[in-house]
Amino acid sequence: MNLVVLAGGRSQRMGLPKYCLSLAGIPLYEYPLRRLGALYQRHIIVENNGLIPADGKSERLVVSDLVADAGPLGGIYSGLRASDAVLNMVVGADMPFVSPSLAQAMGKRACVQDLDILVPNIDGLLEPLFAIYSSRVANVAAELLASGVRSVRELFRNESLRIGFIDRAYGTHYDERLMSFFNVNTPDDLIMAQLMLRAGETSIEEERV
């Protein structure tokens, strides 16, 4: 499996591109890479400004959106086209607390059940940017984009794809507080992420003592 991190988008609610943001001195997009990177052979970063460096890491590949202004669906399509793996874990670059345990469990489930998509459905709220996508999804995404569709949800309605869902109970088994789905969309979210990061560091230090 490969890891695909989507770092494009207009970031309208934030007011500036998210790749410019840092959390505790670390670029925001680095958090999912650091937390999940050890699970996957290659790390593909999809962005649209040409400003994210590859850092010379052999496992890291930085690619540009193949379709301009196509939103997350375009990012997923671009990441899948750049990947040489059958299954891919796709996450947003603005998700600093993604759970390796949940990601790994979802990957195993998608493999065992031979799924094209495995997406969390938490009380009716879909989380398409913490989900598994197979290479077969790329062709379906290409058709949607060519027809002017920009919604990721249309992938989940495609009858040619084998689609599975995980629910809240499954998610909390591996990620008790479901922090994997916290994302930084606004300046207030960034402040909250900073507070949560400090609280986590304090808790770890208390346990060590």
Image (cartoon, rainbow, N blue to C red):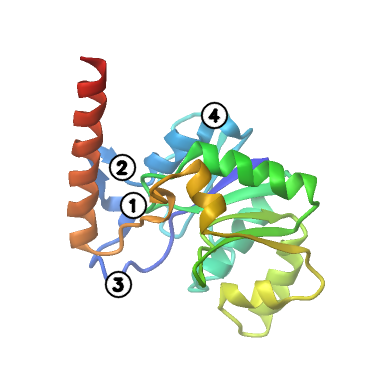
Residue that appears at 24% across and 58% down: 189
Pointer 2 local density, CA inside 10 Å: few below 14, some 14–19, many at least 20: some
Which label sits in the foreground, 3 or 4?
Answer: 4
Residue that appears at 56% across and 78% down: 150
**Residue underneath mark 4:** 38
Report if the CB atoms under discs 2 and 1 are less than 8 Å apart: yes
- In the image, residue 90 lies at what x, y percent? 56, 52
| Spatial separation of the CA atoms under disc 2 and disc 1 | 7 Å
Q: The disc labelled 2 sits on which kind of residue?
A: Pro
Left or right of residue 74: residue 47: left
Pointer 1 local density, CA inside 10 Å: few below 14, some 14–19, many at least 20: many
**Residue underneath mark 3:** 12
* Quadrant of the snapshot with the C terminus: top left
Using the image, tell me which numbered label, if any, was put on residue 90.
none
Q: The disc labelled 3 sits on which kind of residue?
A: Gln
Residue 57 visible (yes or no)? yes
- In the image, residue 73 lies at what x, y percent? 57, 69
The earlier-in-sequence mark between 2 and 1 is 1
| Spatial separation of the CA atoms under disc 4 and disc 1 | 22 Å
**Residue underneath mark 1:** 19
**Residue underneath mark 2:** 27
Residue 63 visible (yes or no)? no
| Spatial separation of the CA atoms under disc 2 and disc 4 | 18 Å
Left or right of residue 72: residue 139: right
Residue that appears at 42% across and 55% down: 181
Element under disc 3: loop
Q: The disc labelled 1 sits on which kind of residue?
A: Tyr
Count of labels shown? 4
86 is higher (above) or lower (below) than 42: below
Q: The disc labelled 4 sits on which kind of residue?
A: Ala
The earlier-in-sequence mark between 3 and 4 is 3
